[in-house]
Amino acid sequence: MTQNQSVLEWMEKMKELVCPDRVIWIDGTQEQLESLRAEACKTGEMIKLNEEKLPGCYLHRTAVNDVARVEGRTFICSRSEEDAGPTNHWMEPSKAYEMLYGIAKNSYRGRTMYVIPYSMGPVGSPFAKIGIELTDSIYVVLNMSIMTRVGNEVVKTLGNSSDWVRGLHCKCEIDEEKRYICHFPEDNTIISVNSGYGGNVLLGKKCFALRIASFLGKNEGWMAEHMLILGIQNPLGEIKYVAAAFPSACGKTNLAMLIPPEFYRQKGYKIWTVGDDIAWMRIGPDGRLWAINPENGFFGVAPGTNVKSNPNALATTKSGTIFTNVVHNLDDNTVWWEGLDHNPPKNAVDWKGRPWDGTSSKEKGAHPNSRFTAPAKNCPCISPEFENGRGVPISAIIFGGRRARTTPLVYQSRDWNNGVFVGSIMASETTAAATGAVGVVRRDPMAMLPFCGYHMGDYFKHWIDMGERLGDKAPKIFNVNWFRLDDEGHFIWPGFGDNLRVLEWILQRCEGKADAVDTPIGFVPKADDINLSGLDLTVDTLKTILNVDSADWAKEADGIEEFYQKFGDKLPKELKAELKKLKEKLA
Ligand code: GTP
Ligand code: SPV
Ligand code: MN
């Protein structure tokens, strides 16, 4: 397959370690993928779904103990502990290698080693980076071949370069106690053992495109962020792009594919999806910030996805898609999940593989973090710029979280550094995307808490530095919160497609066209400036979610101060100054 010495040497070493029965290079051809799908169906690893209703679609169930990212078992193994920082788990690299090699040893006995050469970003684009993942899981091969660009073209593009990310994945026994997701930023290496779930094993995604890439970005002067990218086309046909960072399961896929409300559609608004989870951003020749989506598919949350909430995502999953941990409807060999429709199947199998009657069962049929892996090219609103290796210019950066109270629907930061402050203080209720308690408010700076591959204080500084380089060409920075609750616990803002109403105000602000109210935390819209046409929401209700409560924010400021203490001297002085300014404004 290749004469690349760095690849051959590493593979030899890994082969000696894990002892596969055979080695298969993934060439990216449909024939090879088809034979792997057939093999996975024969062993029961995957179930082929109804070819008429869901052509080329499959169902997979992971082990019951292996359904989400495991943040407590995710490590940054930099040489110095200080470089991993206070928000990451750290292990000394030589100790980590020794432990991981001990677990991985001989674990491919009786199994096949699949070698997946993959490109994050369009193959050969100046933005793109290459990885090679070794895995003993066909499920991983098939997911990676949807989520990334894989095969011969990638090997050819790599040539003799040693600039590529090494990835070893071993299913082992899917033993929770020996599950480790380890990153060696200084060695461009990722090792994942004892898991078969998404973000733990699709090494191009969070491991490479965020944890390793954020480290590369700091050193090379660019940014790897947990952000969707979307284009908003106005009635004049002009398209403006925004990037938005929300924590896991907080609405990136939904926002990236939103369908404009009727009122906006009639005026001629249209949304174009560039990415739904990860953005790599560089300063372009024109001095602006340009973004690409390094992925080639969507690994989206299934529950809650339906014709109303996200018709584009649903359409994207109608062919060539792998479903993980959803309900299997045995009547017509299709899939179902909570929130798909009001007709749960009676004759079905739940995500644990047990018989399930959706009409009477009190238990959920699909896991809350069940997912679809769907090709980007299926998406009805995929941007014509999706394959463009130069990326798209970003007008606004939007941070957001899931907050029942305190954070208003939207506000704008005063300038770049204040915007970095707004990102750094993000807090959100935890979701099922990672193991652990759900619904607990935690600080999640820039939605990168589980994904920053180095010291978070240095990461903040990198943001400040990027702003300095961007100068007056820097995107404007905003914060949104779709999740404010009323006293009965209902969402006040309708969300989903109606979020375009907020995006419209954001773009108007970028062009200096909309007014705002100056509050202690930044600029909030005047209630009249959010277009409510065709919406069953009164201006008075809107005012309740635009409100900035000084007492709540004074408490918030104390929480920020406590959080900031973690970073010691690594907290940039600019952010310290922003906190001081906030406190003064609240006093
Ligand atoms: P990851 O793939 O984990 O990074 O998640 P994500 O950020 O892409 O989240 P996604 O769009 O899949 O949404 C997760 C959950 O939030 C789903 O259950 C959605 O139904 C819900 N959600 C998304 N957007 C909105 C919104 O505007 N309002 C409300 N109330 N819920 C939303
Ligand atoms: C997330 O948790 O942010 C995801 C899913 O996008 S995973 O790939 O598992 O990280
Ligand atoms: Mn994500």
Image: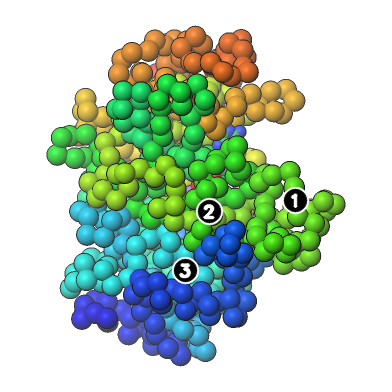
Distance from disc 1 to disc 2, alpha carbons, whole Å, reads: 18 Å
Distance from disc 2 to disc 3, alpha carbons, whole Å, reads: 15 Å
Which residue is under mark 1?
344
Viewer-side residue, 202 vs 340:
340
Q: Residue furthest right?
A: 360
Q: Residue furthest left?
A: 285
Mark 3 belongs to which amino acid?
A: Leu
Q: Which mark is residue 362?
A: none
* Secondary structure under the numbered disc 3 in the rendered image: helix
Q: Quadrant of residue 486?
A: top right
Viewer-side residue, 30 vs 220:
30
Residue 370 visible in the displayed image: yes
Which residue is under mark 2?
317
Q: Which quarter is ligand 1 in?
A: top right
Residue labelled 3 has its Cβ within 8 Å of some atom of ligand 2? no
Which residue is under mark 3?
142
From this view, report whether residue 428 is shown above or below residue 59: above
